[in-house]
Image (tube, helix red, strand yellow):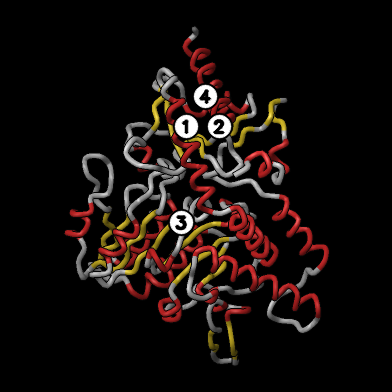
Amino acid sequence: MNVSNIRKDFPILDSRINNYPLVYLDNAATSQKPRAVIDSLVDYYENYNSNVHRGVHTLSVKATEEYENSRIKVKNLINAKSSTEIIYTRNATESLNIISYSWGKKNVHSGDDIFITPFEHHSNIVPWQELCRDKKANLRYVPLNGSGDIDMDKFRSQLSQRTKLVSITHMSNVLGTLLPVKEMIKSVRATPAVTVIDACQSVPHMPVDVQDLDCDFMCFSGHKMLGPTGIGVMYGRSDILNEMPPFLFGGDMISEVTYESAQWNDLPYKFEAGTPNIADAIALGVACDYLQDIGLQKIWDHEIQLGEYAVKKFKSLKNFKILGDRSKEKRGGVFSFHHEKIHPHDIGSALDKFGIAIRTGHHCAMPLVQSYGIVAASRASVYLYNSNEEIDKLIDRLSEIEEYFSGE
């Protein structure tokens, strides 16, 4: 990958923050957008702004074609069997809530078990907490071994015919850890449970194949993969989606209405009530093109290299510690860290004075962060447009910050 050429596609990377060149290391929260994605939004609103699926005039036909073409691009990106298995939502959070509300309320009953892992984002914890509370089901956490990894033997032993759903993050947004989702899903197949993958931190960064993983659902957000905000994806197997009741009612999700009743539209429209987010869906398709043109495997290899380089450079710092064990296997380009005496918010504010953007706080994974005996952490996360030189800037400034707060 030619990172210098890639950076030219992202207008915001030419910005200066506090008179320093922007070093953007907050990609796990949201990614920056290439010019092609930005231009696609302008193109829609300037040249063929119209509603979809409802008109025979030229603008509506064009908008419908582009909207449905984007769905095919998402389908190809994750290798779904059919574009009808791609449901557009606002974000991954909404996708997970739809599964909880639509599938969960119909299929989960008192005494059933739902499994999630200790690594989850709040969006993959709270919907299941609420579902279990409503249904008097049991929310269980996948056991970990002494090294902090999934204990597959214990996990298999805890699965039963009462296991109804297992929802797993593909990659931790705090630790960069890749979970053994394929192995876990294979184990779950011995039960009646459906499987859900939160792929917000994997689909933007690495090749992901839903057929190879054999998952039942997968959720991710467009804004973390070079696309706009306000557009997300819920992938689901068509046989399961067909059995699920709609989440919202009205508009395009209806095929026939009388004064007394209504019939639901076919997939994927059954879950896309009202006028959809047309412009952002089209732009998400452009983002898929951009990622495919570069190659997800190349992006993944680049991020692994950046992560390994960052861990090596962190060793030069005195009292900064990276959360998690990054020595055992290759992990994604997300690394959270903390200092014994300096609060993460002070670190983030100080870095911002030098134009360096990181994330501070609990990263919407409060239980995981607190399991390390801290209330907050700093997090840097890289993407295809980041470089070793930017890691160097981060490390140099962290060293200066440490010296400043220690009074040296």
Residue underneath mark 4: 395
* Residue 292 position (above or below residue 254): above
The answer for how far apart the CA atoms under marks 2 and 3 are is 26 Å
On residue 199, which mark appears? 3
Q: Could you tell me if the residues under marks 2 and 3 are in contact, i.e. CB atoms within 8 Å? A: no
Q: Does 161 sit left or right of 54 as displayed? A: left
Name the disc covering residue 309, or none: 1
Mark 3 surroundings: few (<14), some (14-19) or many (≥20) residues within 10 A: many
Marks 2 and 3, the one that precedes in the sequence: 3
- Whether tag 2 and tag 1 are in contact, CB under 8 A, the answer is yes
**Mark earlier in primary sequence (2, 1):** 1
Question: Measured from the top left, where is residue 296 in percent x and y?
Answer: 53, 53
Q: Residue at x 62, y 33 (%)?
A: 23
Q: Residue at x 39, y 65 (%)?
A: 212
x and y, in percent, of residue 175 in the image:
40, 40
Query: According to the image, label 2 marks what residue?
Result: 388
Q: Nearer the viewer, residue 51 or 187?
A: 187
Q: Secondary structure at mark 2?
A: helix
